[in-house]
Image: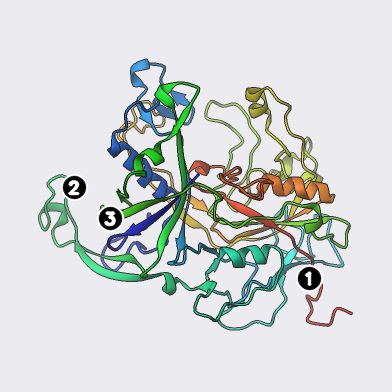
Amino acid sequence: MNTLLLHPTDVLFFRDGRPMTGSLAGHGAAWPMPDIINHALHAALHRADLPGVHAHRRGRSGYYSDIPEERDRKFGCLLTAGPFPVDAASRWFFPRPKDAQHNGTVKTTLLPATSPAKTQHNLWPGSSLPEPLKYAVANSCPPEKGAGGEPWISAEAFNAYLRSEVFPDNLSGRPHFLSDESIADQEAALGIAIDPETQTTGLGATEGKIYTAHYLRLREGFRLGVCAVAEDKLEGGHGEKRDLLQQLLRDHPAQIVVGGQQRICTAQLREAGRLQLPIGLARPEEFARLPNGKFGVKWVLLSPAIWPAIPEQKKDGTRQNPHPGGWLPNWVFLNWNVEKQVAEPEERNGNVLLTSGPGVRKSQRTKGAPGGSLAARLVAAIVPKPQVVTGWALPNSTDPDGGANGGAKSTHLAVPAGAVYHFEADTAAEAVKLATALNWHGGDLNPATLKNRRSTLLGEKGFGLGVCGTWQFYEDVGGRPKE
């Protein structure tokens, strides 16, 4: 994959789906979601008018046209990750894990806590923990105001956090822990509504309408760091491929429209090589053995993830396995229909449904053996408030859901970056298999591309990237000494 650095030439505008009228500012100064950068590069490739690009069939959600003339969808090969803040010293920063809540350090302060008494549902008596969670998370430090830590930590600090190493802040002028204000400023401005049909203001439906908007201005020296690749079939064939991003940016930096209001960024291409994202644990000796004989594996999100609710019936009336989605990954089993616990025993709740190798469909395509099941289950989680993911769809005459005229896409609630999921693996070998399935780099310790994206939706746009560490129980939940 290529490393791109995007340098804004002005303030940037990234609004979500919330209203932007009167005193409501629309939250346009938030850090951009991964899909925004993907859409910006996708549009830049279209504007470049590259010759001989492979064309795809029209349609989405599995409904495709069979008419050869309608092979006009391009750049489906685009794969991106980011953006992440990059400072003048080319250091990458990532969202702070939610179980490390102290400023200037990566020490883990929130840990799963054991309980001496369990109910039949493996919960504490009177606990409000949702299924399939087994342990609550306790704070190992006294409560204090301003707890939470700086929201951004460097890749070096993140790697130390994953390995439970002491990593104090560098006081020599190059801090590894940054606040939002250290990376970008928010600027407010007033605007006048424009009629989209007449492109005029102050008349008709836009008479007297003004709005307040917030804009994001990066601090001097900071860039948007993106990992991206677009390997297209050469002349539409199945053999040799070419990287369209290399072809777009290899001669000189390109001007790319990023976000709303036609804001411009200069895209600079760096040499392809090892990606700058944190590297998760992948060796048996790195995972802690728990008092119950299991091995602790925790998965930390580097980018948001979307796990939609799966209904019991498909649109055509056929049945499927339901899942509530939301904060719970779709690849974690949950028998959420209590009245129908006949076919699926409750003991399976929390089991990881991923495999230790390729799935059945991929193994059929590659003519190899499918991967085996993983002996691991989800037991605890730290999930912050969700983030809103919205968008706008272009007209699509083949969309069976009425998207012929385009319009607003479905609104999704994504689990934000920094969320932590705790798993118990039966053996150290199973812990390694689980980490290989969850790490964005798999088991490769010198990765040059993304291997795993564990978001059910928008994985190609950089959602669902995560890395694995390890964890231990915290037993001092009553404030008394452990002994």
- Residue 373 in view of the camera: yes
Cα gap from disc 2 to disc 3, whole angstroms:
19 Å
Q: Residue 239 in the image: state x and y as whole percent.
A: 50, 23
Q: Which amino acid does label 3 sit on?
A: Arg
Residue 429 vs residue 156: left or right? right
Instruction: Give the vertical position of 142 relative to 348 (above or below).
Output: below
Mark 1–mark 3 Cα distance, whole angstroms, equals: 48 Å
The image's colouring method is rainbow
Where residue 286 sits, quadrant-wise, is bottom right
Of labels 1 and 3, earlier in sequence is: 3
Q: Where is residue 184 in the image (x, y as percent from the top left)?
A: 39, 69
Residue 361 relative to residue 65: left or right: right
Q: Name the residue under label 1.
A: 474
In depth, the one of 19 and 185 nearer the eye is 185
Three-letter code for the amino acid on which mark 2 is drawn = Pro
Say whether marks 1 and 3 touch (CB < 8 Å). no
Q: In this view, does 333 lie above or below 472?
A: above
Label 3 packing within 10 angstroms: few (<14), some (14-19), many (20+): some
Circle on res. 196: 2
Camera-nearest label, 2 or 1: 1
